[in-house]
Image (tube, grey):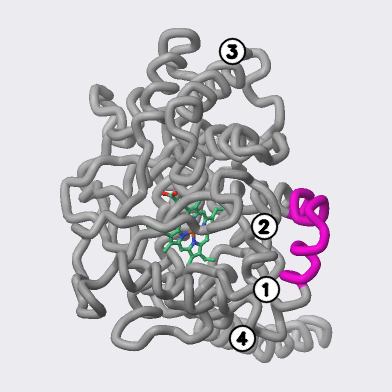
């Protein structure tokens, strides 16, 4: 015969167990996010997990001094190559900084952007470049500290040294990222913000990778250096010329990108480029924000920052205070540099940045059957 306590316990179990199961399934149901937007960063992480051990693996955090013992030559090598390239071509800082952004936003900062295409590149990644700088550095690193430094960390360091080379501060950035085994081209279209977006759309893309409004405004300040092609401003000059541009400026854009006002585009053959910052194009400074106040933002995305009540105050602040810009840029760059990183035993250290290591007998390190292994440059 059961005691009263047993009966009460049984009844409680009968009521609460189904309730618990129901609440779990409701929660799971509401956690569902549309696959196209949600899952590629997650899938990369999940793949890395699975390849690791099949069990929950607590990946260690990034560290400032990660290579202090294993490759103390690292900063010197990166600095030397970036400086030499800058001396040869002072516009090199732009594409090198942009590479880091394109890497981090798609699948996390895992050097997936560097993996060679076996498929078509996505339009949104058109004009990313200076891969040879990464390869040059990696080659030297493989001689001095073989198999130690990841391509993902080289991208991060090249970005910070490029900012420094262009006259900005030298930012300290955490290291210890590892390289992905895969790259999935279509996800770049999903995750990289388009030039035609305004603040709401941009913010949506930033939030998707854990960045916020301040990050959006301050990181857009990277457009204080670098260049853009006609393709990226076509929506502002054809079929109608955006009257927000000063007349003299839009006249230059139209003259160079169209054939007497008739469209030469869309195609990627028109190599005409414009400085993102027409006033101090090669200098990493706060001129970009001053330009926005004078309607000299090149892309719709730039211009929208001064036309939106959510962002205008930040633009004013950075236009008036370069130190504030420099300080927050460093904070947000480091934050961007932590998006979806692989660490510890996740991923691998690629020997050559454009291809995952292939001479490894371990199928986990050289997978052929992941559903997104058709390696393509992001
Ligand atoms: C806010 C969203 C952003 C949009 C919509 C955007 C869009 C673009 C576009 C369309 C170009 C020109 C591509 C071309 O025509 O060749 C460009 C160039 C550039 N972007 Fe962004 N970008 C954004 C954020 C960022 C961020 C966060 C960074 C870095 C932290 C960055 C760094 C650069 C640099 C340095 C260039 C010049 C590249 C060169 O000189 O080749 N951008 N961006």
Query: Where on the picture, by quarter, is residue 234?
Result: bottom left
Task: Check the picture and name the quadrant holding the N terminus.
Answer: bottom right
The residue carrying mark 3 is: 73
Specify the principal SS of the magenta part: helix
Are circles 1 and 2 on residues that touch, CB within 8 Å? no
**Residue identifier under label 4:** 23
Instruction: Residue 318: say if magenta.
Output: yes
From the image, tell me which residue sits under label 2.
287
Q: In the image as oriented, which residue stretches furthest toward the top?
A: 144
Q: Which residue is mark 1?
A: 293
Neighbours of disc 3 within 10 Å: few (<14), some (14-19), many (20+): some
* Secondary structure under the numbered disc 2 in the rendered image: helix
> In the rendered structure, are the residues bearing label 3 and label 4 in contact, judged by CB atoms less than 8 Å apart?
no
Mark 2 beta carbon near ligand 1 (under 8 Å): no
Reading the chain from its start, which is encountered first: label 3 or label 4?
A: 4
Whichever of labels 3 and 2 marks the residue nearer the N terminus, that label is 3
Query: Closer to the observer: label 2 or label 4?
Result: 2
Measured Cα–Cα span from mark 3 to mark 2:
34 Å
Q: Which residues are magenta?
A: 314-328
């Amino acid at each position: 015969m059961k005691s009263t306590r047993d009966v009460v316990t049984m009844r409680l179990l009968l009521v609460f167990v189904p309730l618990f199961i129901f609440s779990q399934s409701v929660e799971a149901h509401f956690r569902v996010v549309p696959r196209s937007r949600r899952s590629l960063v997650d899938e990369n992480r999940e793949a890395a997990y699975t390849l690791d051990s099949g069990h929950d693996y607590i990946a260690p955090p990034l560290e400032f001094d990660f290579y202090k013992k294993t490759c103390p030559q690292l900063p010197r090598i990166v600095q030397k190559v970036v400086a030499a390239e800058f001396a040869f071509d002072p516009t090199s800082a732009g594409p090198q900084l942009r590479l880091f952004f394109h890497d981090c936003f798609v699948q996390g900062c895992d050097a997936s952007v560097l993996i060679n295409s076996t498929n078509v590149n996505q339009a949104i990644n058109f004009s990313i470049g200076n891969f040879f700088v990464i390869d040059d550095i990696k080659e030297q690193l493989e001689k001095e500290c073989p198999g130690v430094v990841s391509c993902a960390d080289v991208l991060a360091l090249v970005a910070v040294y490029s900012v420094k080379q262009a006259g900005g501060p030298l930012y300290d950035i955490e290291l210890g990222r590892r390289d992905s085994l895969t790259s999935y081209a279509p996800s770049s279209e999903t995750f990289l913000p388009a030039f035609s977006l305004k603040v709401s759309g941009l913010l949506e893309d930033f939030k998707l990778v854990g960045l916020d409004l301040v990050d959006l405004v301050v990181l857009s300040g990277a457009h204080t250096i670098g260049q853009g092609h006609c393709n990226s401003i076509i929506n502002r000059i054809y079929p109608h010329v955006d009257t927000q541009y000063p007349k003299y400026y839009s006249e230059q854009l139209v003259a160079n990108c169209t054939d007497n006002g008739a469209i030469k585009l869309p195609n990627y053959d028109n190599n005409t480029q414009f400085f993102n910052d027409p006033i101090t194009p090669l200098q990493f400074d706060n001129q970009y924000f001053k330009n926005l106040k004078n309607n000299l933002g090149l892309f719709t995305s730039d211009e929208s920052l001064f036309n939106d009540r959510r962002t205008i105050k930040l633009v004013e602040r950075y236009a008036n205070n370069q130190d504030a810009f420099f300080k927050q840029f460093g904070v947000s760059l480091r934050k961007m540099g932590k998006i979806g990183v692989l660490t510890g035993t996740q991923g691998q250290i690629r020997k050559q940045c454009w291809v995952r290591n292939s001479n490894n007998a371990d199928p986990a390190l050289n997978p052929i059957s992941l559903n997104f292994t058709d390696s393509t440059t992001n």
